[in-house]
Amino acid sequence: MSRFTGLRPMLWTENLDESIEFYTHILGFEVLSRNDEWHWASLRKDDVHIMLALPNEHENPAAIGFTGSFYFNVDKVDELWEDLKTKAKICYEIETFEWEMREFAIYDNNGYILQFGEPVDNIGNTE
Protein backbone atom coordinates (compact mmCIF):
# COMPACT_ATOMS: atom_id res chain seq x y z
CA MET A 1 0.00 0.00 0.00
CA SER A 2 1.18 3.54 -0.73
CA ARG A 3 2.54 5.59 2.14
CA PHE A 4 1.76 9.31 2.35
CA THR A 5 4.93 11.27 3.07
CA GLY A 6 3.76 14.87 3.25
CA LEU A 7 1.23 17.47 2.25
CA ARG A 8 2.14 20.66 0.39
CA PRO A 9 -0.91 22.80 -0.20
CA MET A 10 -1.13 24.88 -3.37
CA LEU A 11 -2.69 28.23 -2.45
CA TRP A 12 -4.25 30.11 -5.34
CA THR A 13 -3.69 33.84 -5.41
CA GLU A 14 -4.56 36.72 -7.70
CA ASN A 15 -1.24 38.42 -6.90
CA LEU A 16 1.82 36.17 -6.65
CA ASP A 17 4.21 38.96 -5.60
CA GLU A 18 1.90 40.15 -2.82
CA SER A 19 1.47 36.60 -1.52
CA ILE A 20 5.21 35.91 -1.57
CA GLU A 21 5.74 39.19 0.29
CA PHE A 22 3.20 38.19 2.99
CA TYR A 23 4.59 34.72 3.56
CA THR A 24 8.26 35.76 3.54
CA HIS A 25 8.11 39.09 5.40
CA ILE A 26 5.24 38.46 7.83
CA LEU A 27 5.61 34.72 8.51
CA GLY A 28 9.31 34.21 7.75
CA PHE A 29 9.04 31.66 4.94
CA GLU A 30 11.83 31.42 2.37
CA VAL A 31 11.36 31.09 -1.38
CA LEU A 32 12.76 27.74 -2.52
CA SER A 33 11.81 28.12 -6.16
CA ARG A 34 9.91 30.53 -8.36
CA ASN A 35 8.80 30.38 -11.97
CA ASP A 36 7.30 33.61 -13.30
CA GLU A 37 6.30 32.00 -16.59
CA TRP A 38 4.15 29.49 -14.69
CA HIS A 39 3.11 32.11 -12.06
CA TRP A 40 4.18 29.69 -9.31
CA ALA A 41 6.44 29.64 -6.24
CA SER A 42 7.46 27.09 -3.62
CA LEU A 43 8.10 28.30 -0.05
CA ARG A 44 9.32 26.71 3.18
CA LYS A 45 9.59 27.51 6.85
CA ASP A 46 11.14 24.81 9.01
CA ASP A 47 9.25 21.59 8.11
CA VAL A 48 6.28 23.34 6.47
CA HIS A 49 6.12 23.64 2.68
CA ILE A 50 3.51 25.55 0.66
CA MET A 51 3.14 26.49 -2.98
CA LEU A 52 1.59 29.67 -4.32
CA ALA A 53 0.16 30.00 -7.82
CA LEU A 54 -2.15 31.92 -10.05
CA PRO A 55 -4.85 29.45 -11.05
CA ASN A 56 -4.72 28.03 -14.58
CA GLU A 57 -7.67 28.59 -16.91
CA HIS A 58 -8.84 24.97 -16.42
CA GLU A 59 -8.87 25.48 -12.63
CA ASN A 60 -11.65 28.11 -12.63
CA PRO A 61 -9.82 31.27 -11.53
CA ALA A 62 -13.11 32.72 -10.23
CA ALA A 63 -13.02 30.08 -7.48
CA ILE A 64 -10.06 31.52 -5.54
CA GLY A 65 -10.77 30.78 -1.93
CA PHE A 66 -10.82 27.91 0.52
CA THR A 67 -13.69 26.61 2.61
CA GLY A 68 -11.57 25.74 5.60
CA SER A 69 -8.42 26.87 7.30
CA PHE A 70 -4.75 25.94 7.40
CA TYR A 71 -3.63 24.82 10.85
CA PHE A 72 0.04 25.15 11.76
CA ASN A 73 1.45 23.28 14.76
CA VAL A 74 4.08 25.57 16.25
CA ASP A 75 6.43 25.92 19.19
CA LYS A 76 6.25 29.08 21.31
CA VAL A 77 2.77 30.08 20.17
CA ASP A 78 2.68 33.04 22.59
CA GLU A 79 5.87 34.49 21.08
CA LEU A 80 4.43 34.05 17.59
CA TRP A 81 1.21 35.77 18.67
CA GLU A 82 3.19 38.74 20.04
CA ASP A 83 5.03 39.00 16.73
CA LEU A 84 2.01 38.67 14.42
CA LYS A 85 -0.81 40.44 16.26
CA THR A 86 0.12 43.84 14.84
CA LYS A 87 1.33 42.61 11.43
CA ALA A 88 -1.71 40.73 10.16
CA LYS A 89 -5.50 40.91 10.23
CA ILE A 90 -6.71 38.89 13.24
CA CYS A 91 -9.35 36.19 12.87
CA TYR A 92 -9.36 35.35 16.59
CA GLU A 93 -7.00 36.23 19.42
CA ILE A 94 -4.84 33.80 21.35
CA GLU A 95 -6.74 31.58 23.75
CA THR A 96 -6.38 28.26 25.54
CA PHE A 97 -9.20 25.97 24.46
CA GLU A 98 -10.85 23.06 26.27
CA TRP A 99 -9.17 20.62 23.87
CA GLU A 100 -5.83 21.59 25.47
CA MET A 101 -4.55 23.72 22.61
CA ARG A 102 -3.39 27.32 22.88
CA GLU A 103 -4.03 28.94 19.52
CA PHE A 104 -4.91 31.99 17.46
CA ALA A 105 -5.73 32.72 13.84
CA ILE A 106 -4.96 35.40 11.28
CA TYR A 107 -5.93 36.06 7.67
CA ASP A 108 -3.30 36.06 4.94
CA ASN A 109 -3.35 38.61 2.12
CA ASN A 110 -5.77 36.41 0.13
CA GLY A 111 -8.25 35.99 3.00
CA TYR A 112 -7.18 32.44 3.85
CA ILE A 113 -7.46 31.63 7.57
CA LEU A 114 -4.14 30.59 9.10
CA GLN A 115 -4.41 29.04 12.57
CA PHE A 116 -1.42 28.53 14.85
CA GLY A 117 -1.56 26.20 17.83
CA GLU A 118 0.54 24.51 20.47
CA PRO A 119 -0.50 21.76 22.90
CA VAL A 120 -0.84 23.19 26.41
CA ASP A 121 1.45 20.49 27.81
CA ASN A 122 4.27 21.72 25.49
CA ILE A 123 4.12 25.32 26.72
CA GLY A 124 6.99 26.04 29.04
CA ASN A 125 8.95 22.95 28.01
CA THR A 126 12.27 23.88 26.40
CA GLU A 127 13.40 20.34 25.68
Image (spheres, rainbow, N blue to C red):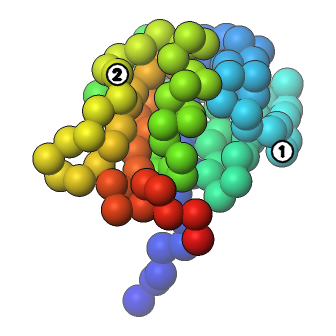
User: Is 108 drawn above or below residue 94 in the view shown?
Assistant: above
**Farthest residue in the front direction?**
124
| Residues at marks 1 and 2 touching, judged by CB atoms closer than 8 Å | no
What residue is disc 1 on?
32
SS assignment at label 2: strand
User: Is 110 drawn above or below residue 103 in the view shown?
Assistant: above
Q: Position of residue 21 (x, y in %)?
A: 75, 18
Q: Position of residue 30 (x, y in %)?
A: 80, 39
Image quadrant in which you'd find residue 13: top right
Q: Is residue 65 left or right of residue 34?
A: left
Q: Residue at x 44, y 39 (%)?
A: 116
Q: Residue at x 85, y 24 (%)?
A: 36
Given the image, on which type of amino acid does mark 2 rest? Glu
Q: Position of residue 119 (x, y in %)?
A: 35, 56
- Label 2 crowd bin: few (<14), some (14–19), many (20+), radius 10 Å: few
Q: Nearer the viewer, mark 1 or mark 2?
A: 2
In this view, the residue in front, 35 or 18, is 18
What residue is disc 2 on?
93
Given the image, on which type of amino acid does mark 1 rest? Leu
Q: Which numbered tag is attached to residue 60? A: none
SS assignment at label 1: strand
